[in-house]
Amino acid sequence: MRLTRCQFDVIATLGDTEGRTCVQLSAATLVTQGTLTGVPDRLAAKGLIQRSTLRGDRRCITVRLTDKGNAL
């Protein structure tokens, strides 16, 4: 599976976690939020991550690895 460096960084950062918000991913990967914006879209299209909203705040999205993403 072909991944960009940024996509790989996101997958590696999400490993062994219950998920992170995009703000947390941006800080952990040292990638600006603007650059990170499309990365979850492309990873979700590949079936590697899933998104869910936090309870009580539907504006905040948590990104988690799928089983396929964990297998990488």
Image (spheres, rainbow, N blue to C red):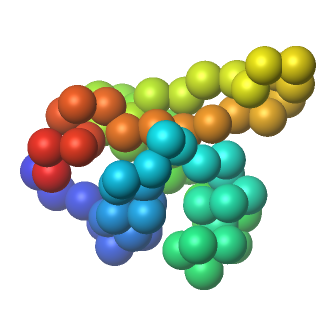
Q: Residue at x 70, y 23 (%)?
A: 53
Query: Residue 43: horizontal and vertical position, in percent?
Result: 38, 42
Residue 69 falls in which quadrant of the image? top left
Would you say residue 13 is visible in this rendering? yes
Q: Residue at x 79, y 34 (%)?
A: 60
Q: Residue 4 appears at what percent x and percent y?
A: 31, 66
Residues 69 and 5: in front is 69
The residue nearer to you, when weighing 53 against 17, is 17
- 25 up-or-down from 70: above or below: below
Q: Nearer the viewer, residue 14 or 17?
A: 17
At which x and y percent is residue 46?
Answer: 28, 34
Q: Looking at the image, which residue is at 55% across and 28% down?
A: 51
Q: Is residue 55 above or below residue 28?
A: above
> From what the image shows, is residue 70 above or below residue 57?
below
52 sits left or right of 23 in the view:
left
Please identify the quarter of the rendering in which residue 12 is found.
bottom left
Residue 10, image quadrant: bottom left
